Image (cartoon, rainbow, N blue to C red):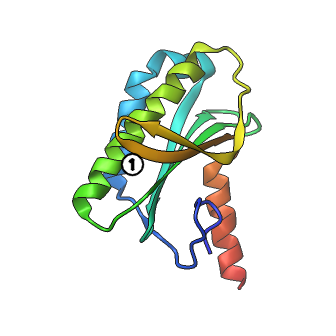
Amino acid sequence: MNTLARKTQEVGGTHLPAQWKDQVTQVLELTYETGLASKNSCFDVFGVSFDNEILVVLSVINKEKVEILPTTLFLSADMEDSEKNLQKTLAALTDASGVFFDAFFEQEHYDDYITNWAPEKFKELDFFYKISRENISLTLIANELLKEEK
């Protein structure tokens, strides 16, 4: 069972390709270069597709101090199983993240966290989002450890 997804997922999803992750990371880090430098931070990007959902997780994490909690944006959209729709949905979710990160980097101290999934619309895409202090990399590591114990 996947605990990150918005919908109940009994079967594990497919991690999005490293090429996608690298491309999104590069675009975000170029776009928000000044804001990241001022916070001594970088992006941590994660994505997974399920039969009925796509999940994108984007975290701003401190480069040096793990004790500084990240700010993490979760984006989820319903999926149809066509490759064309997947690429279109990924592009729209990435674009939609810019609305959040523009506001995030304008503020010295961001504290408008939304821990429950909230609906939103961007262009033609209906999606859901939440914002937390979760360190997605640590969560993924913990999930793998728990899977090994079973």
Residue 102 in the image: above or below residue 54: above
Residue 113 in the image: above or below residue 10: above
Helix, strand, or loop for circle 1? Answer: helix
Which percent across, then down, holds residue 135?
67, 47
The count of marks equals 1
Residue 26 in the image: above or below residue 40: below
Q: Residue at x 32, y 68 (%)?
A: 81
Q: Quadrant of the C terminus?
A: bottom right
Which percent across, then down, holds residue 42?
53, 32
Q: Quadrant of the N terminus?
A: bottom right
Q: Is residue 133 visible?
A: no
Q: Residue at x 71, y 18 (%)?
A: 109
Q: Is residue 52 visible?
A: yes
Disc 1 marks which amino acid?
Answer: Lys
Which percent across, then down, holds residue 2?
60, 69
Which percent across, then down, holds residue 111?
74, 26
Single out the residue that lies furthest toward the bottom.
Answer: 150
Q: Is residue 46 left or right of residue 111?
A: left
Location of mark 1 (residue): 21
- The residue nearer to you, when weighing 2 against 33, is 2
Q: Specify few, some or many for label 1: CA neighbours under 10 Å numbering under 14, 14-19, or 20 or more.
A: some
On the image, which quarter does residue 38 sit in?
top right
